[in-house]
Image: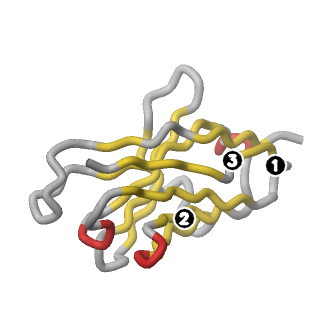
Amino acid sequence: QVRLVESGGGLVRPGGSLTLSCTASGRGFSNYAMRWYRQAPETQRELVAHIDRYGGTIYADSVRGRFTISRDNAKSTMYLQMNNLKPDDTAVYYCNVPPSNYAGIAHDYWGQGTQVTVSS
């Protein structure tokens, strides 16, 4: 069982920065990959960034070079540093733990979401 709690969303002007955090409860944090997704109104949820248990990362084309995903296994926390934010980044951001045979994760786990609004 994994419980995820996000924080750090808010209102920011274009070109600004925000850092999102996602803290996980339960054992085995260092054993599983984690992801950030986002969903804007009337759109499908999209994958923003992925970090594996070794720290390897993958980014969506739309955020590569502006966003950085990282994790602190000692704190059971994942981060998303977002720089040079654009109005198109406005969305609810969700953290996710995908299924993993290695980590014994049987299904997706999701946080409650945190709103990011980029507007002048």
Q: What residue type is labelled 1?
A: Val
The label number, if any, that marks residue 9 in the structure image = 3
Residue 88: where, in percent of width, then height?
Answer: 66, 41
Q: Residue at x 54, y 53 (%)?
A: 62
Asked which colour scheme the image uses, the reply is secondary structure
Dot placed on the residue nearer the N-terminal end, 3 or 2: 3
Q: Read off the residue under disc 2.
A: 79
Residue 86: where, in percent of width, then height?
Answer: 73, 49
Residue 73: where, in percent of width, then height?
Answer: 41, 75
The label number, if any, that marks residue 12 in the structure image = 1
Q: Which residue is drawn at 73% across and 42% down?
A: 87
Residue 113: where, in percent of width, then height?
Answer: 54, 39
Q: Do the residues labelled 1 and 3 touch (CB within 8 Å)?
A: no
Cα gap from disc 1 to disc 2, whole angstroms? 18 Å
Dot placed on the residue nearer the N-terminal end, 1 or 2: 1
Q: Are marks 3 and 2 in contact (CB under 8 Å)?
A: no
Q: What residue type is labelled 3?
A: Gly
| Residue 30 found in image quarter | bottom left
